[in-house]
Amino acid sequence: MSSLRLHFLSITGTVIAFVVSLWVNQLVFADTSFVRGVNWIYLPSGIRLLSTLLVGVDGFIGLLVGGLLMDFLYWFPHDPVRAIAGAIFGSLAPYLVYRLALERYHLRASLTNLTPKRLLILAVAYSIANPLLHHIWFALQGDTHNFVESFVMMFVGDLSGALIMLYVIKGMLALLPKQPGDSHLTNGMFSIRLALNSAYDNRLR
């Protein structure tokens, strides 16, 4: 598979996964909202962190595109500055955590060397970084209404959503076969592993 096609698939897959996770979150956890866009459980945070851990810069780009789409079309259609800022911070925070994982844990393809403890550390790091970036920007804009409550709410929502998604997806990734099998299903799952490995190798070049 060509490098350009891998980039395209990684970015497109991230956008789709992010939008779908947001739709599911609004469908299931709409009643947990504190303010618009901030929930006690926020599943897209897990997609944000997972996508950058798996495909690095491609994940960042996909999250930025998905964030801009949803902010302009759904969350803040009449506030372009807020929409752009939210998309940037929501994409930058997980990318910074990905860089941390790459340097500290020597991250490998399919998250094979991320233990449950390391996943927890990364989830907490992201859940601090994301609201911190947002609330620094809020403070610079002079918006300090419910500042502490909003920070805590965003932290809890990001952490709960990230933990749910990360452990579920990591469990699924662990089931991917390490070599081709005799069935179409096994071969298809092995192809997924190869694609993840190729995407991982490509992002380091």
Image (tube, rainbow, N blue to C red):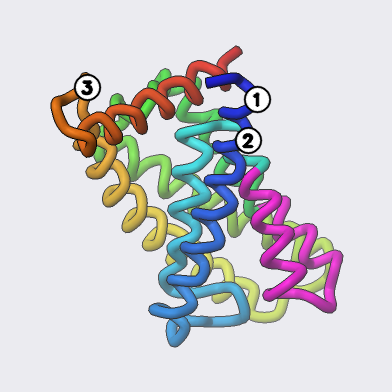
203 over 9 or under it: above or below: above
Q: CA distance from mark 2 to mark 1?
A: 6 Å
Q: Quadrant of residue 72?
A: bottom right
Q: Is residue 72 left or right of residue 177?
A: right
State the residue position of label 2. Answer: 8
Q: Amino acid at mark 1?
A: Leu
Q: Which SS class for mark 2?
A: helix
Q: Amino acid at mark 2?
A: Phe
Residue 62 location (% of width, % of height)? 63, 45
Q: CA distance from mark 2 to mark 3?
A: 25 Å
Residue 92 location (% of width, % of height)? 65, 44
Stretch in magenta: 62-89
Q: Which SS class for mark 3?
A: loop
Residue 154 or 41: which is nearer the viewer? 41
Residue 39 location (% of width, % of height)? 49, 74
Q: Measuring 65% from the left and 55% from the top, which residue is drawn there? A: 66
Q: Quadrant of residue 9?
A: top right
Residue 185's disc number: none
Q: Quadrant of residue 85?
A: bottom right
Q: Is disc 2 in contact with disc 1, using a CB cutoff of under 8 Å?
A: yes
State the residue position of label 3. Answer: 180
Residue neighbourhood size for the residue with mark 1, other residues' Cα within 10 Å, grouped as few (<14), some (14–19), many (≥20): few
Q: Measuring 53% from the left and 45% from the top, which residue is drawn there? A: 13
